[in-house]
Image (cartoon, helix red, strand yellow):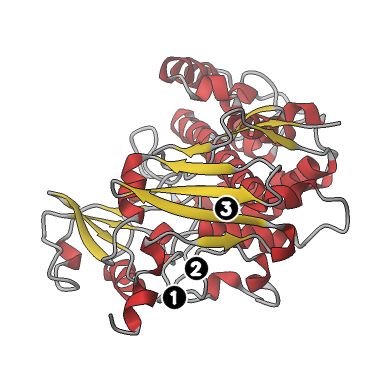
């Protein structure tokens, strides 16, 4: 075996990951069964219960791959090579249909000025929410990330009048039928009266000049609130799990910003970016054909020993003194230029505020099976059952 081989295979054999600092006695072991990875957290001393993370089978298969360019199926090529990912990103602009929030709505493209107004309005609402007292912490009790998502929606958007406030209700957004009914109700409800407290996002709907503009504003409200709250809840939940017993320690509390950046590396909610059609990429790698789609995997790149020292260790201190984490090589927590997360400047501050509320209220994680699952979803998120104390 060459000297390079142990380093190259480090991501694909059992490993230990110590929470920082190691004195906490918290570690993770990864074992592979039939090509699947199960991340097992074991705590010392022995009487402290252990935890585990069980990934969905398709994610397990990805974590077990050694190649940085590989075929997933007959029409999809996966990429975790840092340089090739950069070339794919630069090969062509992102299509509007590949965007999550600013894809076409109401049968038309979202105008650039409308998208800009939405970003500014959402930023205004989040900054206002961070400055206001949070709702009762009991709203965090229950199954995460869902409880955390509902909590954030209540915190940020509960002031909006009916029927607009229904756009941010999870029970509504989960139902296509209810969503269509609410959309139609708001479209025909001009909301011309002033004086009612409302968010800046809701004001975009109220001030729309016509039916088409209002329909697009409704779609943007629904997408923006859902995407932000879902992403922040996933990030905060992943961070809570990776913190381990450290989350139950009294002050002084560690640097939560560093904890969140390290969580974005090891368990990034935006774990895959999808590009349709391979015509623009065929000259970049022989595996990519014109009829192929390309899947970029920050999750795999963030864990590769070619790019990171001790890649499987949860080390928030690696971000100490890093002025701009997004400029770190082989790190893609919010996408890339031209398709970067529209709310990236809001995610970490809001997640830090949510974590602070949870920790201030002595949050504990209850799991009878001593394990948590990460299902195959567009957002990578652990499933945990949470209760605030005492």
Give the mark toward the camera: 1 or 2. Answer: 2
Mark 3, secondary structure of its residue: loop
Q: CA distance from mark 3 to mark 2?
A: 27 Å
**Whole-percent x, y for residue 226 in the image:** 54, 36
Q: Are marks 1 and 2 in contact (CB under 8 Å)?
A: yes
Which residue is identified by label 2?
Answer: 311
Nearer to us: label 3 or label 2: 2
Q: Which residue is mark 3?
A: 343
With 7 as the anchor, is 136 left or right in this view?
right
Q: Is residue 23 above or below residue 366?
A: below
Depth order, front residue of 35/240: 35
Task: Kindly identify which residue carries mark 1.
Answer: 307
Q: Residue at x 78, y 61 (%)?
A: 254
**Residue 221 vs residue 231, the one in the foreground:** 231
Q: Nearer the viewer, residue 148 or 182?
A: 148
Q: Residues within 10 Å of mark 3 (few under 14, many from 20)?
A: some
Asked if residue 128 can be seen in this view, the reply is no
């Amino acid at each position: 075996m060459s000297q390079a081989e142990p380093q190259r295979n480090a991501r694909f054999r059992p490993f230990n990951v110590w929470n920082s600092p190691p004195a906490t006695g918290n570690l993770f072991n990864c074992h592979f069964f039939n090509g699947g990875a199960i991340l097992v957290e074991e705590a010392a001393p022995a009487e402290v219960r252990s935890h585990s993370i069980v990934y969905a089978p398709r994610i397990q298969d990805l974590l077990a791959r050694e190649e940085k360019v590989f075929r997933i199926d007959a029409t999809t090529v996966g990429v975790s090579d840092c340089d090739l990912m950069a070339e794919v990103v630069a090969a062509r602009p992102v299509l509007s249909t590949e965007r999550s929030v600013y894809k076409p709505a109401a049968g038309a493209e979202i105008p650039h000025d409308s998208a800009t107004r939405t970003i500014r309005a959402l930023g205004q609402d989040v900054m206002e929410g961070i400055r206001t007292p949070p709702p009762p912490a009991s709203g965090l009790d229950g199954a995460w990330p869902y409880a955390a998502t509902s909590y954030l929606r209540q915190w940020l958007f509960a002031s909006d009048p009916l029927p607009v406030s229904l756009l941010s209700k999870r029970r509504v957004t989960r139902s296509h039928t209810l969503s269509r009914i609410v959309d139609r109700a708001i479209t025909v409800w001009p909301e011309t009266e002033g004086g009612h407290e409302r968010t800046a996002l809701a004001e975009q709907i109220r001030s729309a000049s016509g039916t088409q503009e209002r329909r697009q504003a409704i779609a943007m409200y629904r997408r923006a609130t859902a995407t932000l709250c879902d992403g922040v809840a996933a990030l905060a939940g992943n961070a809570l799990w990776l913190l381990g017993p450290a989350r139950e320690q009294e002050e002084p509390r560690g640097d939560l910003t560093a904890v969140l950046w390290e969580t974005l590396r090891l368990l990034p909610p935006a774990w895959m970016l999808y590009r349709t059609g391979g015509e623009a990429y065929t000259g970049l790698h022989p595996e990519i054909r014109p009829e192929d789609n390309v899947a970029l995997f920050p999750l795999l790149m963030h864990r590769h020993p070619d790019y990171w020292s001790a890649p499987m260790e949860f080390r928030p201190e690696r971000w100490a003194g890093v002025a701009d984490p997004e400029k770190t090589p082989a790190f893609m927590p919010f996408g890339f230029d031209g398709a970067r997360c529209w709310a990236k400047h809001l995610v970490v501050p809001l997640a830090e505020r949510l974590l602070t509320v949870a920790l201030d209220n002595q949050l504990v994680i209850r799991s009878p099976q001593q394990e948590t699952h990460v299902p195959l979803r567009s957002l990578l998120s652990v499933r945990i059952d949470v209760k605030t104390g005492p």
